[in-house]
Image (cartoon, rainbow, N blue to C red):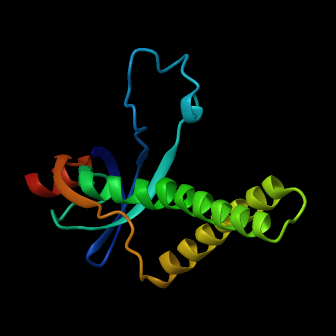
Amino acid sequence: MEQQVTVIDIQGSEAIVHGRRASACGDCAGKTSCSTMGSWVERIIELRVRNTVRAQTGDIVLLEVPDNAVLQIAFRLYAMPMLAFILAGLAMRTLAQHLAWANVELWAALSGLTAVMGYYLWYKSHLAAGSVSGLDVRMVRIIHHSDAADRVLSS
């Protein structure tokens, strides 16, 4: 997945970039009438990326996120919580039936929801601690130099 963004600041070997976040479905013809994921709202991103192409403030650059990284993040954010919900629900349902508790389905649903919340809390703490990697965003190339960069290059 690729995205064009503008460099708004350079801090050492990193660039802070700003741009409109691309949606997963892209910019199709039905974009204005689509309500998928609130696509009528413009989503702005601001990221810190290694400045591997020596971009300057104001340059428009191309960022790339490898497809396998997007799939890994989707798996972590969607498939794992769903799996936690199902496994916790099944385990609690089996336990509740074995112990002859009333409202077996309620216990199963509550344990599944608790497992999902627990997973997201665990994931967030591991992401903050750096033990889970985020997206591997790479700066690929400069698409357009800013006017300031053009003036420096021409002199």
**Percent x, y for residue 105?**
79, 53
Tell me residue 68's x, y (percent): 26, 55
Indicate the quadrant containing the C terminus: top left, top right, bottom left or bottom right.
Answer: bottom left
Q: Residue at x 56, y 60 (%)?
A: 81
Residue 105, visible in the rendered structure: yes
Q: How many marks?
A: 0
Instruction: Report whether 116 appears left or right of 153.
Output: right
The quadrant in which the N terminus is found is: top left
Question: Could you tell me which residue is drawn at 48 percent across and 75 percent down?
Answer: 127
38 to 80, vertically: above or below:
above
Residue 7 location, x and y as percent?
33, 56
Residue at 35%, 59% in the rendered image? 72
Q: Is residue 64 visible?
A: no
Q: In screen coordinates, is 134 left or right of 42?
A: left
Q: Is residue 32 above or below residue 105?
A: above
Residue 129 to residue 15: above or below: below
Residue 3 placement: quadrant: top left
Quarter of the image holding residue 137? bottom left
Nearer to the camera, 134 or 51: 134
122 relative position to 9: left or right = right
Q: Is residue 113 left or right of residue 124?
A: right
Residue at 50% in and 80% down: 126
Toward the right, the furthest residue is 102
Residue 92 point in image, percent of width and height: 71, 66
